[in-house]
Amino acid sequence: MTTIRAYQVILLLIVALVLSTSLSIVQGLTFGEAPGFAVGTTGGGDATPDHPKTLEELIELLGDDQPRVVVLDKEFSFLGSEGNTTETGCRPKSNTACLAKNNGFKGQDVILFPGDTTLTHTGGCDQQVKVEITYDNANKQMMSVGSNKTLRGVGKKGVLKGKGLKLEGDNIIIQNIHITELNPQYIWGGDAFFMGGIDKRALKKIWIDHVKVSRVGRQMFVSGFDGVESITISNSDFDGRTDWSSSCDGRHYWGFILDGTTTRVSFLQNYVHSTSGRSPKIIGASSPNANVVAHIANNYWSDNSGHSFEPGKNAFVLAEGNFFEGTLQPMEADAEKASISVADDCSAALGRSCPGNTVEKSGKFESVNGARALETVKKYKEITGYKPGEATQLSESADNFGVGTLGDSPSQGEVNQTDGSQSEANTKQEDPAPGTSTTGSQNVEMLINGSTGADAPNLNGQESAADGSSGKQGSNGETPSPANQGSNEGDSTQQTDGQGSVPQDSGPPETLPQKPKCTKISRRA
């Protein structure tokens, strides 16, 4: 009897240990709450965590219609899993010029859109020069993520190699994963994140946090078409270092496109480095009445040889508390149509202080049509209720951004919100501000608060980092109707490569302005 009782006690202890461990694992999967526009996002909630072992299992778990918490505790490599394709591609002017320079860097060739036998209907193909290319099929085809999903990596193990994510549902959390190796040698090689709405409406409640993106062929992040009504991108590392770049300098040009008929984005405490353009491009060009609102706060830009911000028409932006180091052009905009609002105007409109942006060894960062931007952004409690920190040059640490360490909350900014719901005034489509055109020439709506710092070269008259031309292609590879040929400023907003990416121009020119000397990144906290 004593022996039986002893076994029972041991069994109970084992059960208790297992339950305790399981509880710790589940609790350990809850890392803070989304700030900004994604407030209230729960993802898969309390669903029992799934640990996929195969590529097929991972695809099935993310794409179904069940609430799920999907945990990546290893690298999932899709390289070669769907075969390769060898076909005719396009050599753009940028790569022709790069080869002629012979400066030790390599350019990008272009994967043509389906059916483009004349080399005239693909964005980025700006000359009819054919070249044979071979690309990985898996890199171009994104993996679908359905509603009510949480995708999290364990430590630095959660790597998606050779496959990006196409978000096709609401209430999604992507946290602590690294997406890399998407045909980096080719324009249209693959996007890391894409979202274009669902059922002819914008997505809702998307939180992308503590992720890393590197070595992609096209965009690190793109929203377009119907857009995404509430998204926060936070604490993430967007690494533009590459062997192939359209700017022929080892820095990735295709960074971000924030577009969509209705898009509301918080871009908070991220590290964007070693890029040469579109970091980010913010434009409402998906439809004539497109409306994009972006709050960009407490981010760190470093080693950017071209332009970072590229605001466009129908976009309303508040940028505050950001730090720029070694960034040639923190902003590229139409200076002829620009107006400037200073930080005092921001404070009066929002009812709170607005920390200035800091530039070091970088170009100027000033407001453009700031007053009109404020008229729109002040309507959103996700912006007015946010408490940004001062501009800070963060150290390269997973505690600050990227994969490896997840904190309980953002390290600087705080959000003062009671729940994830938006008021009726905040969810409806706003009318354009008075005097704002929805078609035709570019109208930039942007507020940039009080840039400070030394060593800011005068960039007036220097060459633009985008030429504004574009090709034409409909979604899912279909040939668009004339109505979808893009605006007269070169924004082909319904153009995709058949996988969903929405380009806005053909990329950088054959030569870029000379970049400033970049100093080594400080290890200041």
Image: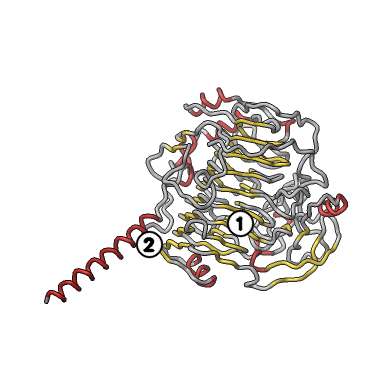
Q: Earlier in the sequence, mark 2 or mark 1?
A: 2
Q: Which residue is mark 2?
A: 47
Few, some or many C-alpha atoms within 10 Å of disc 2 (few <14, some 14-19, many ≥20)?
A: some
Q: In the image, 204: left or right of 2?
A: right
Tell me if mark 1 has few (under 14), some (14-19) or many (20+) residues whose alpha carbon lies within 10 angstroms of its own: many
The color scheme shown is: secondary structure
Q: At which x and y percent is residue 225?
A: 61, 53
**Judging from the image, what secondary structure is the residue with disc 2 in?**
loop
Instruction: Name the residue at 71% across, 32% down.
Output: 363
- Left or right: 164 with respect to 474? left
Residue 419, given in percent of the width and then of the height, sits at: 38, 44
Residue 236: x %, y % from top left: 55, 48
Q: Which quarter of the figure has residue 143?
A: bottom right
Q: Which mark is residue 192?
A: 1
The kind of residue on which mark 2 rests is Ala
- Residue 100 appears in the figure: yes
What residue is rendered at 73% in x and 57% in y? 187
